[in-house]
Amino acid sequence: MSENTQENIQNIQDIIGQVDIFFENLSEYRQKLFSDNITRSEKFFSESKEYNQQFIQPNIAKIDSFLKEYSFLFSVTHQTNQILERALAPRFSVFNYFSSDEMVISYIISDLLNPNGSHGQGILFLELFINILNNELSKLDNNNDKLLSINDLDKTAVATEEATYTLSNSQRRVDITLKNTDWAIGIENKPWTWEQPDQLKDYRTHLERAYPNRPCHIIFLSGSCAKATTDRERALTIHLGYRWSPEICGLDTERVHLNHWLKECHNTCKVEKIRVFLDDFINWIDRSFQYYSDNLAHGAVYAS
């Protein structure tokens, strides 16, 4: 037999020996693991039996009574909810049926502000809005001479997504524009995001160029009650939140929010189906922006 053959046989025997050792170790490990698990299982069942004897059995009557009472309360609650659903439909909202994005919200607000809007209330909602703006303008420095006239409100034109055509190389659009012969207003609607760099400044420049010889104002409508990013725009801009939040807006700004205006519209309007829609809109804003405002107050919400 050659030396190479003997060496190969020896290598094979070594490998077989290593395999035997591996299976012996594996067998010992399985026995130990199985034994440990049996011990743990026995301990678990022993403790469970002891717990059952000490706590469950002596209180079985109380537990049974609690479960029966809970079952009864659950049944009553379910029946009560069914009655409320049939009578009031509290979960129903027209806003559940379409995507309530920024443009949809802007369209709703612009239509309510439009004297010729489908609501049929003429200048009613617009005048309420202008009164709120004038109240805020009176608080800003050097703006008392720029209060908005309520004359000829029926001649106010309302547009959405107006291009800033007076600015060179600008792709920006003003979310809502209101203008008449006495003034011009641009509303930047930011339900869930922040102002972009120089955005309000650009809108103000565009309005002053497009509608000269009249007061021009920018409204920053923010779901988080955010302020303009620059000192100049912060001083000149009218800031409105969507809903009042003391953590975000402060205790002295309860009137400065969209829902206040909507509630005034609701209370003043005499048409029931418009009042129902306004009530739905108000409740949707409260639901949609409560989580946003509350979490923003604790630093848990970030701009997209």
Image (tube, helix red, strand yellow):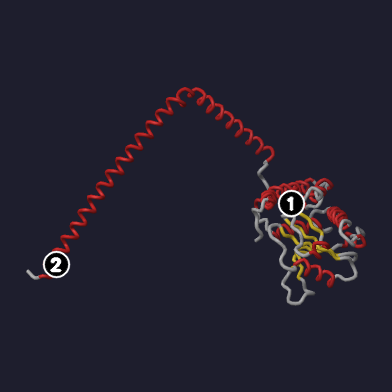
Q: Position of residue 125 (x, y in %)?
A: 83, 53
| Quarter of the image where the C terminus is located | bottom right
Secondary structure at numbered mark 1: helix
Q: Position of residue 137 (x, y in %)?
A: 87, 58
Q: Residue at x 16, y 62 (%)?
A: 12
Nearer to us of marks 1 and 2 is: 2
Up-down relation of residue 237 to residue 163 (above or below): above
**Could you tell me the amino acid type at mark 2?**
Glu
Up-down relation of residue 5 to residue 223 (above or below): below
Along the line of sight, which residue is nearer the eye, 105 or 299? 299
Q: CA distance from mark 1 to mark 2?
A: 84 Å
Q: Position of residue 240 (x, y in %)?
A: 78, 56
Q: Residue at x 72, y 72 (%)?
A: 171
- Residue 49, by quadrant, is top left
Q: Which mark is residue 293?
A: none
Question: So how many labels did they put on this image?
Answer: 2
- Residue 191, by quadrant, is bottom right
Q: Earlier in the sequence, mark 1 or mark 2?
A: 2
Up-down relation of residue 172 to residue 120 (above or below): below
Q: Which residue position is annotated with label 2? A: 7
| Tags 1 and 2 touching, CB below 8 Å | no
Q: Which residue position is annotated with label 1? A: 248
| Quarter of the image where the N terminus is located | bottom left
